[in-house]
Image (cartoon, rainbow, N blue to C red):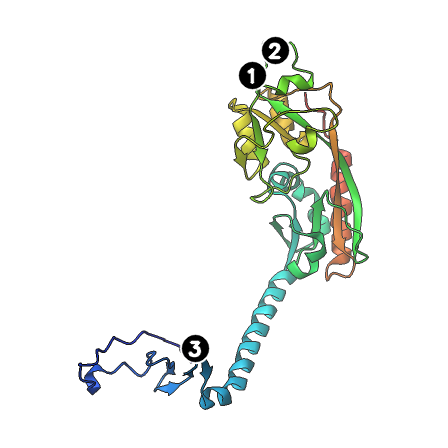
Amino acid sequence: MRWSPQRAPAVSPAQPTSSASRPAPSAISCGSWRIGFGVKLVRREGNGIALTRIAEAALPDIDRGFDALASGLRRLRFERRADTFTIAADPSFSSLWLAPRLDRVRAALGRLDVRIVVSIALDSMLEEGVDLAISYRNSTASHLASADLFIERVIPACAPALIRKRADQHSAEVLDRLPLLHIDQTMGDDVYPTWANWFTAGRERNHIDHGPRFPLTVLAAQAAISGMGALLASELVLREHFRSGQLVEIARKVPALTIKRRLVWPVDGPKARRAAAVAAALAKSEADDPRPIGS
């Protein structure tokens, strides 16, 4: 069945309505939809439209056809998921921590192909077909199991050139005159805390929300390296830049904020046992390769 609605050409009152000027059988004419050989589907009724008797009679069969199509698409998605193991995590974290460790969990994955997607709400893991999530968010849902991965320090950093002659580089005042770079949670990485969280408990600054915004921490880090301003981010994501000297930690005298990243999986999911094994392998990979403190 093929639908091809078209708008009929306008006909003026004085124009003859010969067969040559009539709309094609598949056109919308006088508020009616036609299909194939010219069956009307809807009719005008007051200020709206209503199904014709023929359309109402065919509607149950059409509904069953769409239901069968939806069922087929669900089956296709299920079959695809059966061959894959889906992990949800922030893109920046995935590129810098998760991706380099995938080879170490190959045995736990078996023959499944890994599929990495962006972070999602933990309560929607089953609905979204996610087998394992790496998240700092808490969930008390009884259908989710979890294991702690590690605690991360979230610290301010900038390019060395911005503070080279500053005597206050280890105090909060160093940020008074530095532009702030932001990571927008609505655009990519699901990050916490933000500058608004950092500038609390006695740390004050005007116009905290001003400054460039980036979807990913890795992009904001490149802006910080170029000298655009100060960035607040996980030291895990920034550690390679600390090692190379492209970025330095600032405001060290201020107690660092921390987040606890966790491995989460649905206990009743189709790959729950596999998810538990992958989570254990990822936790072991971190224990075998502890993260250095950025400096």
**Quadrant of the rendering where the N terminus is positioned:** bottom left
| In this picture, residue 253 sits left or right of residue 59 | right
Q: Position of residue 4 (x, y in %)?
A: 36, 76
Give the residue at mark 1. Answer: 162
Closer to viewer: mark 3 or mark 1: 3
Q: Where is residue 260 in the image (x, y as percent from the top left)?
A: 76, 38
Question: Gap in Å between the C-alphas at discs 2 and 3?
Answer: 72 Å
Give the quarter of the image for residue 5: bottom left
Say if 203 sits above or below 74 in the image. above
Q: What residue type is labelled 2?
A: Arg
The mark that comes first in sequence, 2 or 3, is 3
- Label 3 sits on a secondary structure element that is loop
Front residue (pair 278, 211): 211
Q: Is residue 280 visible?
A: yes
Give the quarter of the image for residue 252: top right
Say if 175 sits above or below 60 in the image. above
Question: Gap in Å between the C-alphas at discs 1 and 2?
Answer: 8 Å
Mark 3 neighbour density, 10 Å: few (under 14) some (14–19) many (20 or more): few
Mark 1 neighbour density, 10 Å: few (under 14) some (14–19) many (20 or more): some
Residue, x 74% and y 55% (percent of image)?
A: 274
**Quadrant of the rendering where the C terminus is positioned:** top right
Give the residue at mark 3. Answer: 47
Give the residue at mark 2. Answer: 166
Q: Where is residue 257 in the image (x, y as percent from the top left)?
A: 73, 30
Residue, x 74% and y 39% (percent of image)?
A: 285
